Amino acid sequence: MQIKISELNNLTNLSLPEFIKSGDKEYYDNIMKIAADVRDNSKERPIILISGPSGSGKTTTAKILEGILDNWGYSTHTLPMDDYFSSLTPEQRELADEHKLDLESPERVDTEFLNAQLDAISKGIPVRLPKFDFSTNQRHLTDEVLERKENELVILEGIHALNPSVVTFDDSHTTRIYISVRTRLFFDDDSLLHPEKIRLMRRMLRDKIYRGRKIDHTLRMFDSVQRGENNFIMPFKHRATHDIDTFIKYEVGVYKHLLLDELKQLPPDEKIEDMIAALTEVEPISLDRVPKESLIREFIGDGQFAY
């Protein structure tokens, strides 16, 4: 899909409530269609894998899908793959601080531990669930125990969920979903704001709110993140049984309030020129107009889901 920023501005000025409602509904309807397929094949495929590059909205997609299935009477459990990352050693933490450690590599995942837990969960064996603390880069076991009962569903979401060397579960037992921002924004002169820059804006906001990182830190990681996506995520998107474009048509207008001034204060960088131009051109939308259940609350905070 592609759309001009001027078209977004026209929709904002024509009827903002309807514009916001339709933007969220388009995304939600896509999840509903996938939920119906999961429901119809729940016995054969009790495991749902959700993958996509950083900033694509995997966590919210998983939570919404879980809520729909629960409402239909299918008890569903969501596991973030991030919680199966291996703890970093002091040496690795130092390399990470210097941007010399590939944080997008599938080697970050403790695959032996992950697949052992998935196997146990699929057989109804109780497991203590892990939690990864990004502030300390350490993983620990929680007191939360998951014991999957017959006909219950499990969602695993993470950037490497479709990589068969990471998740070794048999494909015949899985529904596989790939999500990303696919929509391309065009300026009136037909220059482009690539979808990866929408995801970069999302990551800047998420990292600032949830991980205490300044936006220039997220920007410095951009090249490494892109390499990781191209090497470790994109090659497996063809394995998906379903895909979703998670672009929300009004989101850039919301980001204007939250990002534009900070981006302008950064040293000149060609990586941010198009984002500054887009945020300058788009009509602003107040943060308080964003519904609590909207996908973009994953990145701007104060939503109905815990992240």
Image: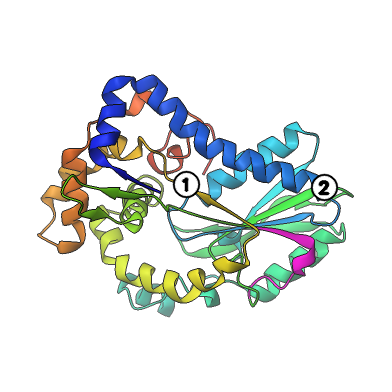
Residue tagged 2: 152
Query: Is residue 279 toward the left or the right of residue 171 in the image?
Result: left
Mark 1 falls on what kind of element? Answer: loop
Callout 2: SS: loop
- The residue indicated by pointer 1 is 246
Q: Is residue 184 visible?
A: yes
First of labels 1, 2 by sequence position: 2
Q: Where is 103 relative to 307, above or below?
A: below
Confirm whether the magenta stretch covers residue 232: no
Q: Position of residue 43 (x, y in %)?
A: 86, 52
Specify whether residue 167 is painted magenta: yes
Which numbered circle lies on residue 146? none
| Place of residue 163 in the rendered image (x, y in percent of width and height, measured from the top left) | 60, 72
Q: CA distance from mark 1 to mark 2?
A: 27 Å
In this picture, which residue range is highlighted in magenta?
Answer: 166-176
Q: Position of residue 258 (x, y in %)?
A: 26, 39
Q: Is residue 226 above or below residue 4?
A: below
Q: Position of residue 128 (x, y in %)?
A: 74, 57
Q: Residue at x 28, y 35 (%)?
A: 7
**Is residue 286 among the parts visible in the rendering?**
no
- Asked if residue 107 is positioned above or below residue 67 in the image, the reply reads below
* In this picture, residue 234 sits left or right of residue 143: left
The answer to whether marks 1 and 2 mark residues whose Cβ atoms lie closer than 8 Å is: no
Please, what is the three-letter code of the amino acid marked with disc 2? Glu
